[in-house]
Image (cartoon, rainbow, N blue to C red):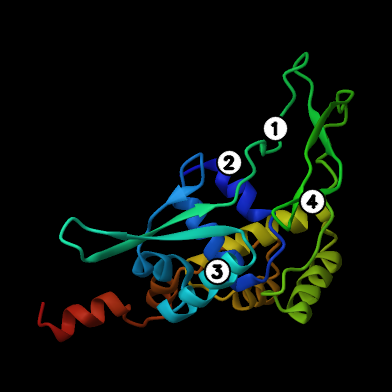
Amino acid sequence: MSSRALAWAWIQEVKAGPKMVLVALADRADEDGYCFPGLNWIATKTGYSKDAVRRNIQRLAQLELLTVEMRKRSDGSNTSNEYQLSIPSDFAPLRPSKLQGRPSKLQGGTSKLQGLHTPNYTFIEEEENKNKTPPTVAFVIPDWLDDETWEAYVEMRKKERHPLTDYAKNLIVRKLARFKMKGYNPQEILNTSIENGWRGVFEPRLEREQQRDGELSPKIQRMLRRGL
C-alpha cells in the first residue's frame, strides 16, 4: 500500500462509483501507482459486482486516471490486469514543513495533467498555530451520502450543543467512507447515531446487538444447522 497513491486517489473529483474503485486500487498500488489486483478482490473491497467494477474501471480509463494492461501467464492464459494510476511525478501529499519544525499550509488551485484537474501543491511556511486549532477544510457532501439524512445528523449535533465544524464534518465523512467500503450503509449508520443521540458514527456490531436482544447470531445459527 502506498500512502502517496491513496492521498492522490482521495482528492480526485469523480463520482462515487469510480472513486471507490480508484481508492481500492490505490490501496494496493506501489509508490509509482502500479498494482494488479483481481476483479474478485476489487469487488470484495468495494462491495460492487464484478460488472460494476469493470464499468467503473472503464470510466476511470476514459478520464485518464489510470491505464490498463492485460497480463498473461507463461502458458498463455489470462491473469489479472495491471493498472497504473496516473499520479503526477511531482505529486506529494500534504505534510508538515521541515523548515524549523513549523507546520506548512497548502495553497494554490488546480493544474491540468493529461486533461485532468489535479491539485497544484505549493508548500509555504506559516507561523506556528498557537491555538492548536485544526486547519480549515472546505466541506462538500459526497454524492453517495443522502443530503436529508446528513442534515438531520448535523441538526442533532446542534441541539446537543456540539455543532460540527467543516473539519469535523470531513472526519465524519471519511469514517463513513471506510464503513461503506466494508459494505455498511452510511445512511443507516447516521440514523443510528441520530436515534441514540451519539455525537460520532460507529461501525455496526450486528452479532453483538442480536445476542443482546436475545437472538442467535448468524454464526451460531449456522453451527446449529450443521449439528455442531
Q: Are marks 1 and 4 in contact (CB under 8 Å)?
A: no
Residue 152 sits in which quadrant?
A: bottom right
Q: Gap between marks 2 and 1, in whole Å?
A: 11 Å
Earlier along the polypeptide chain: callout 2 or callout 3? 2
| Residue at image mark 4 | 167
Q: Amino acid at mark 1?
A: Arg
Residue 203 visible from this viewpoint: no
Earlier along the polypeptide chain: callout 4 or callout 3? 4
| Residue at image mark 1 | 95
Above or below for 29 versus 99: below
Q: Amino acid at mark 2?
A: Arg
Mark linked to residue 4: 2
Please rate how many residues cluster around mark 1, counting C-alpha atoms within 10 Å: few if below 14, some from 14 to 19, many from 20.
few
Give SS at disc 4. Answer: helix
Above or below for 109 versus 159: above
Mark linked to residue 180: 3
- Marks 2, 1: nearer the viewer: 2
Image position, residue 133 (x, y; %): 84, 37
Give SS at disc 3. Answer: helix
Q: Amino acid at mark 3?
A: Lys
Q: Nearer the viewer, residue 95 or 223?
A: 95
Q: Gap between marks 2 and 3, in whole Å?
A: 22 Å
